[in-house]
Image (cartoon, rainbow, N blue to C red):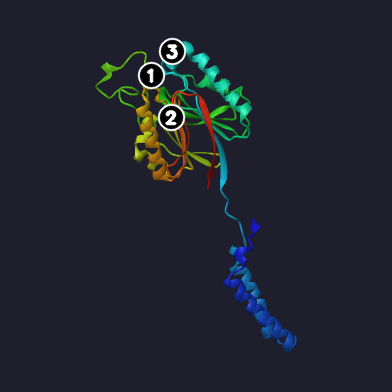
Amino acid sequence: IRLCVFPFIGARSISFGVIFVSSLLATLIQGKANRIHLGFAIFFSLWFMVASSGHIWRALPDGPRQVDVIVVQPNLAEKEKLNTANYVHHMDYYTKLIRKIQETERDWDVLILPESLIGDLGEDALSSRFRTLGLAQNQLLIFGQLIKRSGNIYNAVCFFKNGVIGNVYLKHKLVPYSESIPPLFNILAKAHVHYFSAGPVPKPIRIDGVRYGTTICFESMFPSLYSCLKDSDILIVATNDAWFDRHFQELHLRSAIFRAAERRKPLLLANNTGISAVISSEGHVDQWLPSDKAGYIRTKLNIK
């Protein structure tokens, strides 16, 4: 609690000053025996202290804070990602990529990687690798990965902090025939493919006072999902558009622009092979990485 100077200077303080000074002068002029004016001075002093207590002494609202974010575009070809023989190599690649960023960039808060880093259930292996990075206690990794919970497999975004995955977002809208098989069509299922269970509707995930609203892949096409994320401070789309050509990647970028502008929230698009972008709450693309290029974007976002 701090003393607020400016709210003190207003109509009430001026009125109090006039009454108090008038009563005090009258008391001095007419002598100490004039208890009426002295009583007025005491009464108005007490009244002013009580009536203005909420305006003189109060907690100032927190000013906007900045979150220093890095969005990473690994740029791994889809055929390579799906090859099980490459999984260990890819985990090495991610950790080396983050270490390189650590050597170059200092004092960041959040680092975001795209959807499905490893094309299999690699949650524990990735967590083990990320624990070797020596992240600061306040640093957060956000990355997409397949995870298993209660016998079900989900396409998820994981929030990794202090050496553990503390929060997850489970993809709600699944791609038909690719991520899920509709009832009565099980004959079309492929034996070597992971099919996912749908998670609950998204809601903001709060970490260190920041509310992250996360969706995965083509979920950014659905405005109805983002109505559930209206209280977020930062919107995130974790995706892997390596399946598609540049035209779809540009379409995905445009859908993200619409979501940011609709919700008046900054949006971070983290894409495996591009396009990755930082989009302002007005829908402007402030920074972006082109397709088929490894790299990262660093930005500071103001959180109210």
* 12 relative position to 214: left or right: right
Which mark is in front, 1 or 3? 3
Q: Disc count in the image?
A: 3
Question: Can you tell which mark lies on residue 283?
Answer: none
Residue 59 location in percent, x, y?
60, 56
Which of the marked residues, 2 or 1, is nearer the chain's N terminus?
Answer: 1
Q: Quick check: can you spot residue 147?
A: no
User: Do callouts 2 and 3 mark residues in contact (Cβ within 8 Å)?
Assistant: no
Amino acid carrying mark 3 in the image: Asn
Image vertical order of residue 2 relative to residue 273, above or below: below
Q: Mark 1 points at which residue?
A: 194
Compare residues 177 and 170 and report the one nearer the observer.
177
* SS of the residue under disc 1: loop
Image vertical order of residue 264 relative to residue 59, above or below: above
Disc 2 versus disc 3: distance between alpha carbons? 23 Å
Which of the marked residues, 2 or 3, is nearer the chain's N terminus?
Answer: 3
Question: Can you tell which mark lies on residue 275?
Answer: 2
Q: The N terminus is located in which quarter?
A: bottom right
Which quarter of the figure has residue 149? top left
* SS of the residue under disc 3: loop
Question: Can you tell which mark lies on residue 83?
Answer: 3
- Residue at 63 percent across and 34 percent down: it is 107
Amino acid carrying mark 2 in the image: Ile
